[in-house]
Image (spheres, rainbow, N blue to C red):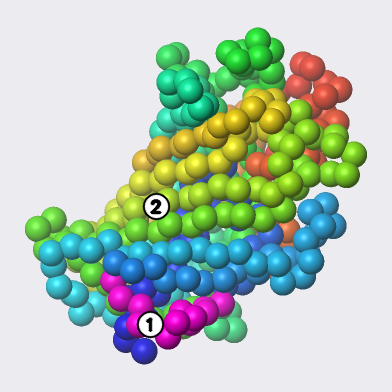
């Protein structure tokens, strides 16, 4: 099925969400990915959307039934170049790009960017700067690429670039504690034999992949009693993650790929700690990031991240030892819900919770 190979390479970008973003990434409880053929029988070609489905684990706090699914659409970035003829698989090529061939090795990514608030009828406002990291480990077992990681994202003052402990909401006038992102674990299990066909730009000798990932699933903060309505009253969680993922085309032949860049754009509702209630609008994240060279440690991360890890987040020096099929991935929304009592009862608490 060579026509699918062009699109299937884009499937690998799903795991970029582990270190983005954003952070603020909300691929909570991702269990597995399975392919679905276009319903109209059309061939999938570069530049056209290719749809896959992913299923969520049943979780009582979401009330999600087993098999609840949403869609992700991917497009290959068209260029003037021809296929390089480089072929591989998720468990071969992507393992080198995102992780490492050595299942005991840890892979660090970091990112930095801006967070803008968009409210109808108002000028966009840059409300935060952000900086984050992810440390991951991966292995191939029983035909699957299994990955496990921990990730941090800190919201910073966009002027001073300092970590925010509190944020003055310019729309409500409230002074609010800032809940930074600390997701542990973030896990994925993907078929390792998915074939890949890489396209490159001959003018820059880079390989570029675009992934468009719309998210729509039950909001973990939606409860019958409306306990969290002041923070996010929506019944469904709606967001989108959009990536451009690049490396040198020549590096794809190497056993170790150190130089990998990522551009990440995210749209979502207002972060729960912003306490925007039912106010219309959304956040737009725009970040760039990169992979640290093989053998790096947390000490090579951004100084702010190093300081926070050494002071309070010691467990983030390393990735989890192995993928745990029984563990539930953590998202910023589920983290807020899990620690809501601390948020409401301890006004002097700092975030994230030391770990």
Q: Residues within 10 Å of mark 2 (few under 14, many from 20)?
A: many
Q: Residue at x 55, y 65 (%)?
A: 71
Quadrant (top left, top right, bottom left, bottom right) of the C terminus: top right
How many discs mark residues in the rendered view? 2
Q: Residue at x 76, y 42 (%)?
A: 221
Magenta-colored span: 34-46
Asked where in the image residue 151 lies, by quadrant, the reply is top right
Is the residue 34 above or below the residue 10 in the image? below
Task: Please give left or right for residue 326 compared with residue 262 in the image.
Answer: right
Q: Nearer the viewer, residue 79 or 290?
A: 79
Q: Residue at x 60, y 48 (%)?
A: 238
Instruction: Please indicate, yes or no, whether residue 134 appears anywhere in the rendered image.
Output: no
Residue 243 is marked as 2
Instruction: Please indicate, yes or no, whether residue 199 appears anywhere in the rendered image.
Output: yes
Mark toward the start of the polypeptide (2 vs 1): 1
Q: Secondary structure at mark 2?
A: strand
Quadrant (top left, top right, bottom left, bottom right) of the N terminus: bottom left
User: What residue did someone put label 1 on?
Assistant: 42
Q: Residues within 10 Å of mark 1 (few under 14, many from 20)?
A: few
């Amino acid at each position: 099925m060579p026509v699918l190979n062009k699109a299937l390479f884009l499937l690998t970008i799903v795991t970029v969400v582990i270190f983005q973003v954003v952070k603020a990434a909300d691929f909570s409880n991702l269990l597995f990915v399975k392919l679905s053929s276009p319903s109209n029988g059309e061939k999938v070609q570069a530049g056209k959307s290719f749809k896959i489905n992913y299923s969520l684990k049943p979780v009582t706090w979401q009330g999600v039934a087993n098999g609840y699914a949403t869609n992700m659409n991917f497009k290959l970035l068209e260029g003037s170049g021809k296929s390089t003829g480089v072929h591989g698989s998720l468990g071969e090529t992507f393992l080198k790009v995102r992780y490492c061939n050595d299942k005991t090795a840890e892979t660090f990514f970091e990112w930095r960017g801006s967070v803008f608030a968009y409210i109808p009828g108002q000028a966009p406002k840059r409300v935060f700067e952000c900086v984050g990291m992810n440390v991951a480990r991966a292995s191939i077992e029983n035909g699957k690429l299994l990955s496990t990681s921990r990730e941090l994202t800190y919201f910073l003052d966009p002027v001073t670039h300092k970590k925010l402990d509190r944020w003055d909401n310019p729309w409500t006038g409230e002074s609010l504690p800032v809940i930074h992102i600390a997701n542990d674990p973030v896990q994925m299990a993907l078929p390792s034999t998915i074939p890949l066909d890489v396209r490159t730009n001959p003018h820059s000798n880079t390989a570029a992949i675009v992934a468009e990932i719309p998210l729509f699933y039950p909001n973990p903060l939606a409860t019958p009693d409306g306990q969290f309505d002041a923070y996010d009253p929506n019944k469904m969680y709606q967001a989108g993650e959009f990536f451009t993922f690049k490396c040198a085309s020549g590096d794809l032949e190497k056993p170790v790929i150190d130089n990998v860049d990522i551009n990440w754009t995210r749209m979502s509702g207002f972060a729960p700690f912003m306490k925007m209630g039912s106010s219309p609008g959304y956040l737009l994240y725009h970040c760039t990031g990169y992979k640290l060279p093989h053998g790096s440690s947390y000490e090579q991360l951004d100084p702010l991240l190093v300081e926070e890890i050494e002071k309070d987040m010691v467990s983030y020096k390393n990735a989890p030892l192995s993928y745990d099929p029984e563990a539930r991935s953590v998202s910023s929304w589920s983290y807020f819900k899990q620690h809501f009592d601390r948020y409401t009862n301890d006004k002097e608490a700092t975030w994230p919770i030391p770990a």
